Image: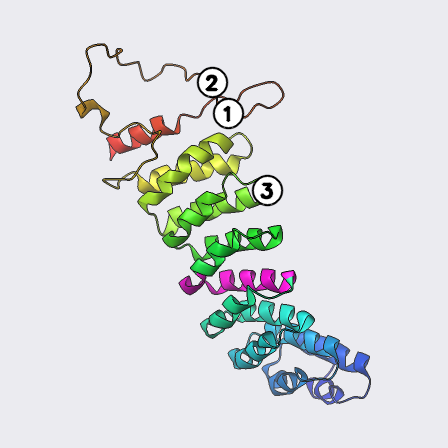
């Protein structure tokens, strides 16, 4: 391995390729002694050197680099901005949150995506409103990354935005949103998670993730009282309601569940309904 002192000296070499190689090597070594020289290299005249320097600073992970990386991100230079945003996510300093939120409006889609990823790594709840808005935008990669980031932050205020994309046309986005709801159910459960159940019920046969998230939500919210439930759900205290004279008899619990007429057809078959509201009723009775 080359000596750090020699690599630092090479950052002043007239050759751009040698400077770029020196920056990459310093990033691999991760020696904090190279930090002052790398901070200076962020002002290099060559764009590729500046970009590689941001990558190296992220690998070293020293918080002293945060102000310089923030300044790089604010210059709106695409290549360096992308790597500066990622470096800030690797360092995970909350000081960068306001600038990363602004970067969600950057003209370059990759910068927006890296900013969303970085906000998820920092896990600061201040980013939840802007990441929730990013779910509604047109770029699929940014939307997917925003859903992942909201799951990493795991704040209940993101629940409505995540539920709103559960039936989106983008399958990958739906999966990320479902996983994010499962993460919130595990760390910050709220009654509003119940509104995801009907949509998860329509998706369970596409991927095991949906059913796993559904079960997690039921378990996380089973002990909560006075829950707001979707309009299609039966009341949790149905036994106490007045029963009309023509009411049908109570069906046995082990009666087979009929097929769901509203479910999406695949290969000529209608997937059976999973009966999420039956599981919900049983969970409430047992709480």
* Residue 15, quarter of the rendered image: bottom right
Apparent side of residue 197 relative to residue 19 in the rendered image (left or right):
left
Q: Are marks 1 and 2 in contact (CB under 8 Å)?
A: yes
The answer to whether marks 1 and 3 mark residues whose Cβ atoms lie closer than 8 Å is no
Q: Is residue 28 visible?
A: no
Q: Magenta stretch: residue 85 in it?
A: no
Place of residue 283 in the rendered image (x, y in percent of width and height, measured from the top left): 30, 32
Q: Secondary structure at mark 3?
A: loop
Answer above or below: position of 218 versus 256: below
The residue beneath circle 2 is 259
Label annotation for residue 263: 1
- What is the CA distance from the residue labelled 1 to the residue labelled 2? 8 Å
Which residue shows up at 19% across the image and 11% down it?
A: 245
Magenta region: 109-127
Residue 141 in picture, x, y percent from top left: 61, 53
Q: Which label was assigned to residue 137?
A: none
Left or right: residue 272 compared with residue 45: left
Front residue of this view, candidates 54 and 259: 259
Crowd band around label 1 with a 10 angstrom C-alpha radius: few (<14), some (14–19), many (20+):
some
| Residue tagged 3 | 170
Q: Quadrant of the C terminus?
A: top left
Labels 1, 2: front one: 1
The part of the image, by quadrant, that contains residue 17 is bottom right
Where's residue 216, x and y in %? 40, 40
Of tags 3 and 2, the one toward the viewer is 3
Which of the 4 quarters of the picture holds residue 79? Answer: bottom right
Mark 2 nearby-residue class (10 Å; few <14, some 14–19, many ≥20): some
Residue 113 shown in magenta: yes
Residue at 41 percent across and 18 percent down: it is: 257
């Amino acid at each position: 391995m080359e000596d750090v002192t020699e690599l630092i000296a090479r950052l002043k070499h007239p050759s751009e390729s040698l400077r770029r190689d020196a920056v990459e090597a310093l990033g691999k070594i991760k020696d904090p002694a190279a930090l002052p020289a790398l901070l200076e290299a962020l002002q290099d005249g060559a764009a590729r050197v500046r970009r590689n320097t941001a990558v190296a600073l992220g690998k070293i992970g020293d918080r002293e680099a945060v102000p310089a990386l923030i300044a790089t991100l604010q210059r709106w230079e695409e290549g360096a901005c992308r790597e500066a945003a990622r470096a800030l996510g690797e360092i995970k300093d909350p000081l960068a949150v306001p600038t990363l939120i602004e970067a969600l409006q950057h003209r370059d889609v990759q910068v927006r995506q890296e900013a969303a990823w970085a906000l998820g790594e920092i896990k600061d709840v201040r980013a939840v409103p802007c990441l929730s808005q990013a779910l509604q935008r047109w770029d699929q990669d940014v939307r997917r990354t925003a859903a992942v980031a909201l799951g990493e932050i795991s704040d209940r205020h993101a629940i409505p935005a995540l539920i709103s994309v559960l039936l989106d046309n983008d399958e990958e986005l739906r999966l990320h949103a479902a996983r994010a709801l499962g993460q919130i159910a595990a760390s910050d459960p709220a009654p509003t998670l119940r509104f995801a159940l009907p949509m998860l019920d329509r998706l369970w046969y596409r991927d095991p993730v949906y059913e796993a998230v559904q079960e997690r939500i039921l378990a996380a919210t089973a002990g909560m009282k006075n829950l707001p439930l979707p309009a299609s759900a039966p009341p949790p205290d149905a036994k106490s309601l007045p029963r009309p004279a023509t009411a049908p008899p109570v069906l046995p619990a082990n009666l087979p569940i009929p097929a769901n007429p509203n479910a999406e057809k695949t290969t000529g078959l209608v997937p059976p309904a999973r009966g999420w509201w039956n599981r919900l009723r049983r969970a409430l009775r047992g709480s």
